């Protein structure tokens, strides 16, 4: 059985993969950047923040690999990580208003991109 992704799904998967890889690289390189912490968040990042975010990005990358391989668990993982990200942000004491909007937009885009290809996933 031959599966072919729509150009929209291919493009979104490629863009998502690039964004996660760039984000992961930035977080690893800048994790101890105290100046960034002070300028962006007023020194508010908890010590556990960067390791948790880096771990989440590795999981996100794994979910994207799953989607490239036509596995439904990939999108289930992305949904779970999106929700976990909101909870972790809230636990860290950051306002989640904007992040909640972005999370909803992210999940809506995934739904739009995957809805026509869903039957092709295992």
Image: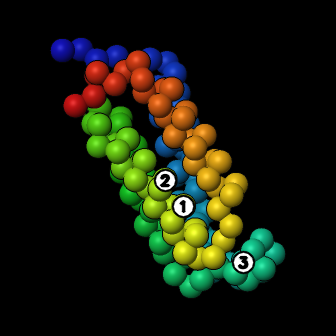
Circles 1 and 2 in contact, beta carbons < 8 Å? yes
Which of pointers 3 and 1 lies earlier in the amino acid sequence?
3
Q: How is the image coloured?
A: rainbow
Residue at x-position 42% and y-position 27%: 114
Q: Secondary structure at mark 2?
A: helix
Residue at x-position 63% and y-position 47%: 102
Picture layout, residue 74 above or below residue 46: above
Residue carrying label 2: 82
Horizontal and vertical percent position of residue 112 = 51, 26
Residues 19 and 104: in front is 104
Residue at x-position 29% and y-position 37%: 72
- Residue 37: give its label: 3
User: Could you classify mark 1 by the number of other residues whose Cα lies within 10 Å: few (under 14), some (14-19), or many (20 or more)?
Assistant: some
Q: CA distance from mark 3 to mark 1?
A: 19 Å
Residue carrying label 1: 86
Image quarter where the C terminus lies is: top left
User: Could you classify mark 2 by the number of other residues whose Cα lies within 10 Å: few (under 14), some (14-19), or many (20 or more)?
Assistant: many
Quarter of the view holding residue 117: top left
- Residue 54: give its label: none
Relative placement, left or right, of 111 versus 59 is right
Residue at x-position 34% and y-position 16%: 4
Picture layout, residue 100 above or below residue 121: below
Horizontal and vertical percent position of residue 20 = 52, 51
Horizontal and vertical percent position of residue 28 = 55, 69
């Amino acid at each position: 059985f031959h599966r072919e992704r729509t150009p929209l799904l291919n493009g979104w998967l490629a863009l998502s993969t690039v964004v996660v890889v760039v984000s992961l690289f930035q977080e690893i390189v800048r994790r101890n950047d105290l100046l960034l912490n002070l300028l962006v968040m007023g020194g508010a990042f908890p010590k556990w923040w960067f390791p948790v975010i880096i771990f989440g990005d590795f999981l996100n990358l794994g979910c994207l690999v799953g989607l490239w391989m036509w596995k439904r668990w990939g999108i289930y993982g992305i949904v779970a990580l999106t929700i976990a990200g909101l909870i972790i942000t809230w636990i860290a004491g950051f306002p989640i208003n904007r992040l909640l909007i972005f999370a909803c937009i992210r999940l809506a885009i995934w739904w739009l991109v995957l809805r026509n290809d869903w039957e092709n996933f295992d």
